[in-house]
Image (spheres, grey):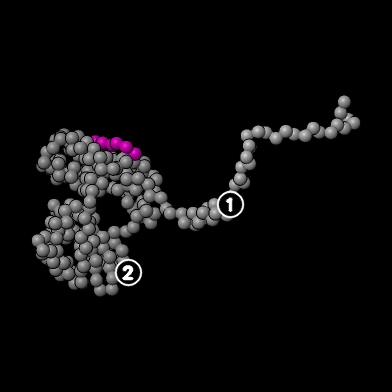
Amino acid sequence: MGQKVHPNGFRIGVIRGWNSNWFARRRQYTELIHEDRRIRDLILKRYPDAGIARVEIDRGANQITAAIHTARPGIVIGRGGQKVDELRTLLEQATQKRVRINIQEIRTPELDATLVARNVADQLQRRVAYRRAMKQAVQRSLQRGAKGVKIICSGRLAGAEMSRTEMEREGRVPLHTLRADIDYGFAEAHTTLGRIGCKVWIYKGDILPERRGEAEPAAAAVEAAPAPAPRREGGGRRREREPRPRTGRES
């Protein structure tokens, strides 16, 4: 089958949560969905070089909280927090609501699939060889602790007349395992010959649930187990059996 399930949406409710956390009635639901989209587009267009991976939105009674995950927080904050204040004013004018902004730094951008895909796309726009860009991105992610990386680029690679698909993969990428922590990202390279799509899958390991109910009975059983009997001195010698009395049947 050619259809693929989105790795992030496939794991929502198991090991992942939503990027928008709020509840609304049916009449307001569509309006708030479009408002979230406008907020994300406005932030990404205002800071295209800040390395923004995702924007999480929480809604309260009269306030919107936007958490910006970025690899370059200094660009978003600005000198003395000036750019954050400008962004907050811009968002409040667009939504007519109070807006609170939280900046969260991404310590290892090599393990974020969206940032890796954006990095490969930027190199393709600068006319870097696609094989070199893909291999270097895979090696950097593996050096940072990833257990598996897969990168797929599709389009008119190297100026070919017909578009094709190239893949670079190393390690394990178990897409069907729900407990597998797989990050997925997508980016487009806008070249003079057309667009080139870059998809990235990064496998970071398994997320296992905590089993509290099973750990406590096991500990109680260990405590309640009887202590082993003390060993007798000179226990190395075997005890001799007494001879069995003969009966009339034995000859």
Residue 39 seen in the current view? yes
Q: Secondary structure at mark 2?
A: loop
Where is residue 171, by image quadrant? top left
Q: Amino acid at mark 2?
A: Ala
Left or right, 214 with respect to 37, comes to: right
The quarter of the image holding the C terminus is top right
Q: Amino acid at mark 1?
A: Ala
Identify whether 23 is placed above or below 8.
Answer: below
Query: What residue lies at 19% left-to-right and 72% top-to-bottom?
Result: 96
Residue 228: where, in percent of width, then height? 59, 47
Q: Which residues are magenta?
A: 165-172
Residue position marked by numbered label 2 in the rendering: 24
Give the mark, 2 or 1, whose residue is nearer the N terminus: 2
Where is residue 165, by image quadrant? top left
Q: Which mark is residue 21?
A: none
Q: Residue 182 versus residue 77: which sits nearer the camera?
A: 77
Left or right, 69 with respect to 215, comes to: left
Q: Residue 9 versus residue 223: which sits nearer the camera?
A: 223
Q: Main secondary structure of the magenta part?
A: strand
* Residue farthest to the bottom, as pictured: 62
The quarter of the image holding the N terminus is top left
Query: What residue lies at 36% left-to-right and 42% top-to-bottom?
Result: 174
Please identify, in this view, whether the residue under mark 2 or under mark 1 is nearer the observer: 1
Residue position marked by numbered label 1 in the rendering: 225
Residue 32: where, in percent of width, then height? 26, 66
